[in-house]
Amino acid sequence: MTDRYAKYQRLKFDWPDERILRVTMENPGRLNSADRIMHGELVEVWRDIDSDPNVSAAIIRGAGNAFSAGGDLDLVKEMSEDFETLTRVWKEARDLVYNLVNCSKPLVSAMEGPAVGAGLVAGLLADISIASRTARIIDGHTRLGVAAGDHAAIVWPLLCGLAKSKYYLMLCEPVSGEEAERIGLVSLCTEPEDLHDKALEVARKLAVGSPTALRWTKYALNNWLRMAGPTFDTSLALEFMGFNGPDVREGLASLREKRKPEFNPKCPL
């Protein structure tokens, strides 16, 4: 492993094939939820991958049987109580989206189990998003008591249309991998046992493609996301405004109760 990845704590790295870097989100016992450390690392890693001459394609997945259960509840609580934490995470949330959009290397996501909130940003903004049939994709914001910010406003309407976006984002309904493929929210759906093999197969094809052609095709297509930038910035501001409101305290209490006595994969949020 090159030195540029040695600094990471919550993200683990391996090379499943030549010039393919696989990034694994790992937060043991918490369904790979994005705590303070992981949230910051998910911002920085795309810059490192973009500038790494040894990487032609990357894969993002979660450790074990979960992609990511979203924002860690301890971090959410800290954001609701401390303005400096809130502003730091707001900037990280913005940079996470833009760093993903601007990364020139092709990215494949492999989602299984809960795929929620902050982790879902990488899952859905990947160039090729793959979900197992049994994945549970949930935005999670309105259940917590804040506006659906992060990636949702910038990418959900483009992927699956405004009507479906409103239904799933406002009601916070889970989307199975099978349904996500049907409505166009993800690129592909596989059986759970085939997920990681399929992600590697796709990454191999990308890794041997023309770097110039892929880079500029991705850049051109992502202009749709860049044009939605003002909408995204507004949604993010509205989301983080909500962390000072009473709904977040009620939402946190409800979510903590659902996660007792341990994290429940059937109810990541």
Image (cartoon, rainbow, N blue to C red):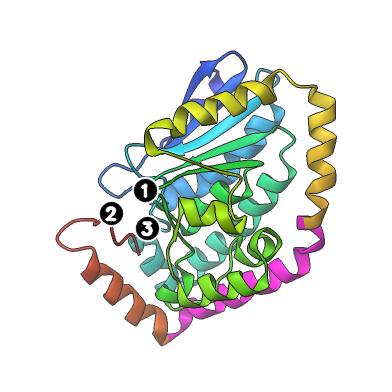
Q: Quadrant of residue 172?
A: bottom left
Provide residue 121's location: percent of width, then percent of height. 56, 53
- Foreground mark, 1 or 3? 1
| Residue at x-position 55% and y-position 60% | 88
| Residue at x-position 25% and y-position 46% | 29
Q: Secondary structure at mark 2?
A: loop
Mark 2–mark 1 Cα distance, whole angstroms, equals: 7 Å
Judge whether residue 230 can be spotted in this image: yes
- The residue nearer to you, when weighing 177 against 240, is 177
What's under tag 1, amino acid-wise?
A: Gly
The total number of labels drawn is 3
Q: Secondary structure at mark 3?
A: loop
What's under tag 2, amino acid-wise?
A: Pro
Which numbered dot is residue 265? 2
| Residue at x-position 71% and y-position 61% | 158
The local crowd at label 1, few if under 14, some if 14 to 19, many if 20 or more residues have their Cα within 10 Å, is many
Provide residue 187's location: percent of width, then percent of height. 61, 45
Please, which residue is most extreme toward the left here? 261
Query: Along the polypeptide, which appears first: circle 2 or circle 3?
Result: 3
The local crowd at label 2, few if under 14, some if 14 to 19, many if 20 or more residues have their Cα within 10 Å, is some
Q: Quadrant of residue 220?
A: top right
Residue highlighted by disc 3: 72
Provide residue 245's location: percent of width, then percent of height. 45, 84
User: Are circles 1 and 3 on residues that touch, CB within 8 Å?
Assistant: no
The residue stretch that appears in magenta: 225-245
User: Are circles 2 and 1 on residues that touch, CB within 8 Å?
Assistant: yes
Residue highlighted by disc 1: 113
What's under tag 3, amino acid-wise?
A: Asp
Which numbered dot is residue 104? none
